[in-house]
Image (cartoon, rainbow, N blue to C red):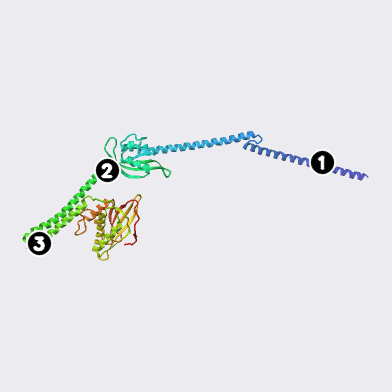
Amino acid sequence: MFALLQGGGNTQHLWMIAAALGIGFLAITGFVVFLMRRFLQKTREGHQEEVLEAAPRTQNPSAFMTASMQGVIQKLRDQERELERLHKIEKERAEKTERLSEEVTRNMPAGLLVVNATGIISSANPAAEQVLGIRGLGFRRYSEALGAESDLTRLVAECLTSGKIFRREEVDHCPPAGDTRRLGVTISPIRRGTEKISGAICLLTDLTELAALQQRMQLKENLAALGELSAGIAHEFKNALATISGYAQMIPEVSEKDAADYAGRILQQTRNITHVVTEFLKYARPLEISGETVTLETMVDRVVAEVAEAIPQVKIRSEGEFLDLGGDEGLLRQALLNLARNAAEACALAGDGGSVVVRGEVIHGEDLEFQRISVLDNGPGIPASALTKLFRPFFTTKANGTGLGLAVVQKIIVQHGGEVEARNRAEGGAAFIVTLPLPRGVPEAVESRQDSI
């Protein structure tokens, strides 16, 4: 019994120890949980403080809206300051560009006029006032300032009306006080978009001194040419008169038969002198050019046929495009016939196998179209020493030539507003190239032949 009681006491003691251990474990666990909760709470509070610092508290809607509006207003103010800064920079740049433009316009040597669509001179630089001899051009009507009947007024009016561009025109201008001036003029319209003309820009250059210098140089050239012509005529007359004088002195001392022969030679020299005078008159006298329409293709065919008949040993043909042009058919035929005959004679002197081609070509320029006529041969070519003298009066490479044929050709072509040049061909032979202006709206060629030389 005592043993049981003793055993029951031990069991109770064990239960007490277990209970004490459980309470201690619970206390330790509770303490750990408490510490963890405190740590988590502090971490959460720190995170909330960071959030509250970064954004306004959402618990108060009015404060949140006020803070948001203040943020937007601040951004707008920043953008406004940036726009003001950019506007200031752009304004300074525009003012700088305007000052530079004004300085360039004021100091440029050419006169500048800007006329608006209503006919008022909106801008004029000092050079324009000096060239025109007029002060205070700005904000005046151009027809009043320049003269209602002046050529310059007419050009500006046509530019404002039709938009036509005038390049390097020359007009005479009479300033209010002073002599007449020769002006170089370039006028261009100012357009808004593609159609409407809002004004005109006029560039002016005083060419008075240059024109006077050109006139003096032209006078010297004319006097020099007159001297060469006089020398050429004198040389031809001197040779003929010497021959005539020699035969005339011998007539009294020879038989009647020889006298008749000498008289015939005297008559031949007289004819030579007459021929020289006739050719010189063709060159010297003014040409009267009619304004008829020349069917160039038909005229070229006639020239080719005539040269082929006169010099049958040389082959001659025409090719290319020939348009109708305005001018004197007789004079143009004379010029082309002279060039074609010269080419055929050069080929004939070189021997067999000579050929001549009269080639037509239409050249399209910026404002005009031109008819080019090339007379090409495969003869001996032109001596280098003679190339620069070919069109000089009384210069000739032929034994019996007068030296006036090519000079007359050049005069005819120049009087028709064209030009003629000579050159040697790379493949051998010579080329004489005539360029003549075509009228506007010319019809298309009837035929285009594609043969080649």
Q: List the residue tagged with mark 3.
A: 260
Crowdedness near tag 3: few (<14), some (14–19) or many (≥20) residues, C-alpha within 10 Å: few
Q: Residue at x 31, y 35 (%)?
A: 134
Q: Residue 101, located in which quarter of the rendered image?
A: top left
Q: Amino acid at mark 2?
A: Ala
Q: Is residue 213 left or right of residue 97?
A: left
Q: Position of residue 332 (x, y in %)?
A: 26, 55
Q: Considering only order in the chain, which callout, 3 or 2, is on the residue closer to the N terminus?
A: 2
Q: Mark 2 touching mark 1, by CB under 8 A?
A: no
Q: Considering only order in the chain, which callout, 1 or 2, is on the residue closer to the N terminus?
A: 1
Q: Nearer the viewer, mark 3 or mark 1?
A: 3
Judge whether 312 appears above or below 46 on screen. below
Element marked by disc 1: helix
Q: Residue furthest left?
A: 253
Element marked by disc 3: helix
Q: List the residue tagged with mark 2.
A: 211
Residue closer to the observer: 75 or 256: 256
Q: Considering only order in the chain, which callout, 1 or 3, is on the residue closer to the N terminus?
A: 1
Q: Amino acid at mark 3?
A: Ala
Q: List the residue tagged with mark 1.
A: 20
Q: Position of residue 356 (x, y in %)?
A: 28, 61
Q: Mark 2 touching mark 3, by CB under 8 A?
A: no
- Residue 267 showing in the rendered view: yes
Quadrant containing the N terminus in the rendered view:
top right
Element marked by disc 2: helix
- The CA span between labels 3 and 1 is 181 Å
Quadrant containing the C terminus in the rendered view:
bottom left
